[in-house]
Amino acid sequence: MISLQHYLALGAILFAIGVVGVLTRRNAILILMAIELMLNGVNITLIAFARHAGNLTGQIFVLFIITVAAAEAAVGLALVIALFRGRDTLNVDEIHLLKW
Amino acid sequence: MIEWVWLIPALPAAGVIINGLLGNRYIKERAHYVGVGSTALSLLVALFVIGAAIKNPGPHNVRLFDWVVAGSLHVDVAFLVDPLSAVMLFVVCGVGFLVHVYSIGYMRGDPGYPRFFTWLNLFMFSMLLLILGNNYLLMFVGWEGVGLCSYLLIGYWFERKSASDAANKAFIVNRIGDAGFLLGIFLIFKTFGSLAYAQVFAAAPGALSTGVATAIGIALFIGAVGKSAQLPLYVWLPDAMEGPTPVSALIHAATMVTAGVYMVARSAVIYNLAPDALLVVAVVGALTAIFAASIGLVQNDIKRVLAYSTVSQLGYMFLALGVGAYISGIFHLMTHAFFKGLLFLGSGSVIHAMSGEQDMRRMGALRKHIPITAITFYIGALAISGIPPFAGFWSKDEILAEAFKSGHYVLWIIGVATALMTAFYMFRLIYLTFYGASRVAEHAAHHLHESPPSMTAPLVILAGLSIIGGAIPGFPPEKGMFHAFLSQVPGMAPAGGGHAGLVGTALAAQEGAQAAHELSSAMHWFLILLSVAVAVAGWALAKHFYVRRPHLPERLARRFGGLYRLLLNKYWVDEIYDAVIVNPCKRFATFLWNFDAWVIDGIVNATSRLTVLNADFSAFFDRYTVDGAVNGLASVLQGWAGVFRRLQTGFVQNYALAMLLGIFAIVSLYLFV
């Protein structure tokens, strides 16, 4: 029997992998992908709770998150392309205009 | 007809505008069409107005518009037509027109031709304003206007230093007189609260004390002394001969210089109340007459002789005014305008023929070459000398008779002596110029020619007026139609009224006028014969000196060397004025200039130095104290900002890590504490 705890553990593991990916990857595309992982971790958690509580609110929230994630991926990839055209690199260590 | 009187000055004014704006560029050598045309139309209107004034002597006031309205001061632009202004109108427009015509010939080919006619028209406008205005302020405007035109026309050939100097002299000397005139106007306004003749003269007998009347009279007379070239301000007139000859004829003989005479005659009502002022007028007039005539005896420049003659004749007019014979003075003004205008224009014709030569010592025997000029000149000389029946005889005889009647025998003797001198210097001029042996220089002799008709025609007309202009209006003496016409002007009649001046108070003035003792007819004939005899004696003397025994003058000059030099150098009056007035003024001005340059400028410069010093100190304080504080604060902030900005790595992943750690911390706190 797969219980609520299993789902929550899966969500937590996915989220942690995503966080590590965001913090450690130097390629912008990989960072975006890691963010997707984090989002999906949260989605699993939300669905699990919704199922557990017998409440549809969580599922609807997830639908929104998927929509936003799609939009975010579109905008993020567009930015990445623009960045690549402008600077010939996707290494975030070299993209440091905001640095002092 | 009389309401059209404003056209008379307006027409020359239009000429000024047209010639002044378009003359140099478009009209050029056709300027005389505008100049002479406007004057001719003006004369035409004037003749109609004079005709109307003879029919109905008025006075007619033609009011155009309010001019100055300020508090109690109310001045109209309004014209007064009465017998006095009608006579002046005839003189100014008549002689003015003839001089304009004459100028066509005389000024031909001059580069400033349109400018000349512009100024000449401006002069006509100003002079007409002067004589037609119905109040003192309008008269003053005209007065200053003619002064300006006089300045402009004396300095017409301004490239010549002597001409521009003469113009300055005329203007400055006239300023002195004008100041007096202005004071007189102020006094009149203060006393009467009005400047219109009608109101002032109506109120004068009651409102005017003898003291104030004398003050006004003297102040006005100072103005007349300047404008009409009397002692001691006559010095500008002889120098004014630097101007073109038509200008000398019109402005400095016939019209402008008689403005003072007109003004005193116009103010007759006031002068009748001020016997002392009248006495001053008479004495100054008589002294000027003989003083100027004596200078005229020995001058060699043809125009200078005429200039001193003008000063002398103006003295005669003031003598007449001073003894209360206003009408005789105005009569002499008119006849003088005819014959002196004629003489000046004649001298212009001579100068024209002589290619510019003015020294009579280099003339002689011109009679054959320029016959019309010679004959008309002769007539003018007869008229000014007082040979009957020419114009000058009638007016001069009247003046002498009036002086005699007034009881001032000294003034009368001066007048008679002046008449002798007048005849002498006029015929001296005639004989030196037109008779005797020719002393004309070679180059000038070739060009000797009679002047063009535009110049001789005015000469002939003026000669005609010099013949009949005295006898017709002036016969019989003191009862002719001229007297009948002018005695309608308030204050001027009866002719004896001015004797009052010598009797004393205003009240006595009227009684004296009624009781004015008439001379016996024997006495009258004696006076007439005497004045003729004196004139003939002067004539004969001149003939004896310059025709019969031409070496006599030289011998006399050597014999009485001191006197001769005194006269030849015009009593050194110019030099005395230079020494006593002009040079001290200049020295004082230099002193003031030095004071200004060293003391005032020194103070100013010292102040500026101090200010600069103070500014330097302020700048130092500003730079090091105020700026130091501001910059110091900025540096401190910048330093700390440099420290803190290290936190902003710019790596998003760093921020994300920080965020993550923060969340861990908060969650840990929430869960375990």
Image: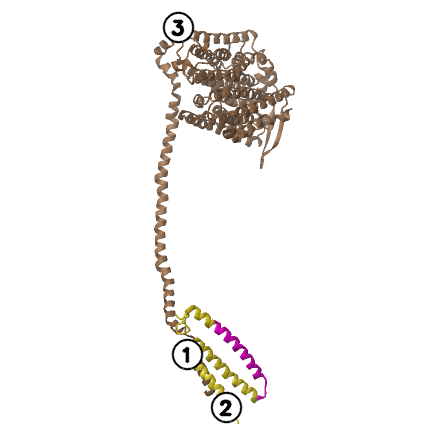
Chain colours: A yellow, B brown
For residue B253, the mark is none
10 Å crowding of disc 2: few (<14), some (14-19), many (20+):
few
| Residue A63 is one of the magenta-drawn residues | yes
When asked about the image quadrant of residue B295, the answer is top left
The percent coordinates of residue B369 (x first, y second) are: 45, 11
Q: Secondary structure at mark 1?
A: loop
Q: Which residues are magenta?
A: A53-78
Disc 3 target residue: B549
The three-letter code of the residue at mark 2 reads His
Disc 1 target residue: A25
As measured in the structure, the alpha-carbon distance from the residue carrying label 3 to the one carrying label 1 is 142 Å
Residue B287 can be seen, yes or no: no
The percent coordinates of residue B566 (x first, y second) are: 37, 17
Please give the name of the residue rendered at 59% of the width and 23% of the height, measured from the top-left corner. B41
Task: Locate residue B194 relative to residue B289 in the image: left or right.
Answer: right
On screen, residue B663 above or below B179: below
The three-letter code of the residue at mark 1 reads Arg
Q: Are marks 3 and 1 in contact (CB under 8 Å)?
A: no
Closer to the observer: label 2 or label 3? 2
Please state which of residues A59 and B62 is positioned toward the viewer in this rendering: A59
